[in-house]
């Protein structure tokens, strides 16, 4: 397979990072668990978790429990206040403030802000450390109406909890960084693929979006939807191995060219197979051109032998192809394309997937209209 150097580089980067990404650790899940534990172990009204930004040395909020949505943005401000940062980060010491109104930890102007914008009466915050390196802070607080003060025992308890969860949080943070690095690599690869065909600009991104909309309508799990999105994004990645003159040909393809282009799901699977373990991502790439009646390619799979992800991406892919201008065919309107999809229900597409597509399409046809 011939590849341009830039694409090859991107593939190598993809290879390097994605193995580490298959771990199930996620920052959101880990921080949720910590927040829940802190709040329930210390029986407090609220909990909040901050991570330290290495460059600015400020604490930024990554999650909170017990606060109303409009209070959370005020809580985020707390992480940049000097009084809190000096104790927690510079001195690496826990803080107990039982009377915010009289505390010397805050600047004069900060107290009215705290009093009005946050329902906190007392709080306890401890640094999160791994091998003496501070990575963030964990805060618990009680409502000003409840007036329950924090004690030295509370401080010990929260510090123990913080010690136990710091490593998990650090791993999740690193995993999150890797994940965004991985997503950047995938996005640049996909852009390279889409750029090979002048008519498919933005195609992969749209297919991913449409597939997820259908998946949401089918009540599929959050994890499945995440992989479905990735699969939709990468469904045509195998086109990286197809000659440019075939992809950009503005006339009908001959038999030999058709045979070559039909290899892209298999090439795509080969590229991604060694680096991604998710079955959903792999089958979506390999099976998005299979037909429900068994007349698709590359394996002529039939009905439920085609994976759910393959059947969903097939509909999303067809909808975007129909609504895009082609050299030999003017784009259909979204409504015409939706009708066309229904006509091919049972032959090309799974009727259940078509039903879900029609349902979500009819709820808001306008959002399918714009590219
Ligand atoms: Fe394709």
Image (cartoon, rainbow, N blue to C red):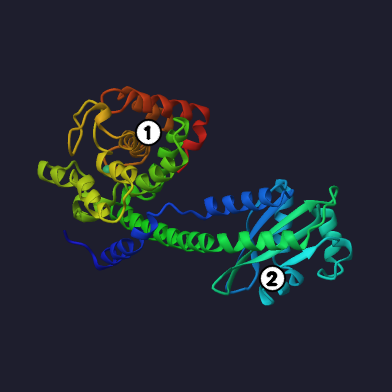
Q: State the image coordinates of residue 294 (x, y, percent, origin top left).
A: 20, 28
> Residue 177 or 140: which is nearer the viewer?
140
- Which quarter of the rendering shows the N terminus? bottom left
Helix or strand or loop: what does disc 1 sit on?
loop
> Residue 207 or 164: which is nearer the viewer?
164
Q: State the image coordinates of residue 230 (x, y, percent, origin top left).
A: 38, 48
Q: Is residue 139 above or below residue 68?
A: below
- Which quarter of the rendering shows the C terminus? top left
- Look at the image and tell me whether residue 138 can be seen: no
Q: State the image coordinates of residue 95 (x, y, percent, origin top left).
A: 75, 67
92 vs 358, left or right, is right
Q: Quadrant of ligand 1?
A: top left
Quadrant housing residue 74 = bottom right
Helix or strand or loop: what does disc 2 sit on?
helix
Instruction: Point out the residue furthest to the left here.
Output: 256
Q: Residues within 10 Å of mark 2 (few under 14, many from 20)?
A: many
Instruction: Point out the residue furthest to the front here.
Output: 153
Mark 2 vs 1, N-terminal side: 2
Q: Which residue is mark 2?
A: 88
- Residue at x-position 25% and y-position 68%: 5
Q: Which residue is mark 1?
A: 332
- Residue at x-position 28% and y-position 65%: 12
Quadrant housing residue 256 = top left
Q: State the image coordinates of residue 38 (x, y, percent, origin top left).
A: 65, 53
- Residue at x-position 56% and y-position 61%: 164
265 vs 55, left or right, is left
Q: Is residue 135 above or below residue 207?
A: below
């Amino acid at each position: 397979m011939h590849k341009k150097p830039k694409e090859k580089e991107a593939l190598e980067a993809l290879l390097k990072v994605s193995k580490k990404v298959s771990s199930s650790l996620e920052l959101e899940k880990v921080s949720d668990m910590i927040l829940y534990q802190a709040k329930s172990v210390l029986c407090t009204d609220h909990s909040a978790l901050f991570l330290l930004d290495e460059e600015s040395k400020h604490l930024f909020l990554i999650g909170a429990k017990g606060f109303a949505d409009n209070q959370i943005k005020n809580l985020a401000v707390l992480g940049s206040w000097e009084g809190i940062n000096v104790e927690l980060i510079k001195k690496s010491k826990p803080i107990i403030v039982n009377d915010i109104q009289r505390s010397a930890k805050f600047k004069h102007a900060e107290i009215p802000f705290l009093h009005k914008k946050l329902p906190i009466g007392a709080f306890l915050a401890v640094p999160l450390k791994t091998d003496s390196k501070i990575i963030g802070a964990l805060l618990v607080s009680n409502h000003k109406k409840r007036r329950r003060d924090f004690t030295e025992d509370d401080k010990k308890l929260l510090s123990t909890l913080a010690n136990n969860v710091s490593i998990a949080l650090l791993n999740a943070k690193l995993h999150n960084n890797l994940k965004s690095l991985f997503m950047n690599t995938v996005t640049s690869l996909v852009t390279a693929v889409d750029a090979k065909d002048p008519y498919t600009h933005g195609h992969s991104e749209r297919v991913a979006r449409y597939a997820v909309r259908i998946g949401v309508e089918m009540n599929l799990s959050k994890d499945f939807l995440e992989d479905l999105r990735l699969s939709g994004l990468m469904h045509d990645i195998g086109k990286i191995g197809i000659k440019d003159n075939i992809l950009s040909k503005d006339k009908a393809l001959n038999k030999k060219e058709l045979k070559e282009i039909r290899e892209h799901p298999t090439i795509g699977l080969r590229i991604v197979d060694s680096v991604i373990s998710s079955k959903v991502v792999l089958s979506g790439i390999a099976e998005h051109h299979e037909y429900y009646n068994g007349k698709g390619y590359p394996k002529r799979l039939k009905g439920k032998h085609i994976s759910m992800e393959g059947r969903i991406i097939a509909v999303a892919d067809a909808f975007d192809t129909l609504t895009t201008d082609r050299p030999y065919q003017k784009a259909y309107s979204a409504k015409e394309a939706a009708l066309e999809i229904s006509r091919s229900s049972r032959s090309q597409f799974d009727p259940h997937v078509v039903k879900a597509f029609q349902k979500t399409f009819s709820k808001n046809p306008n959002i399918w209209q714009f590219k």
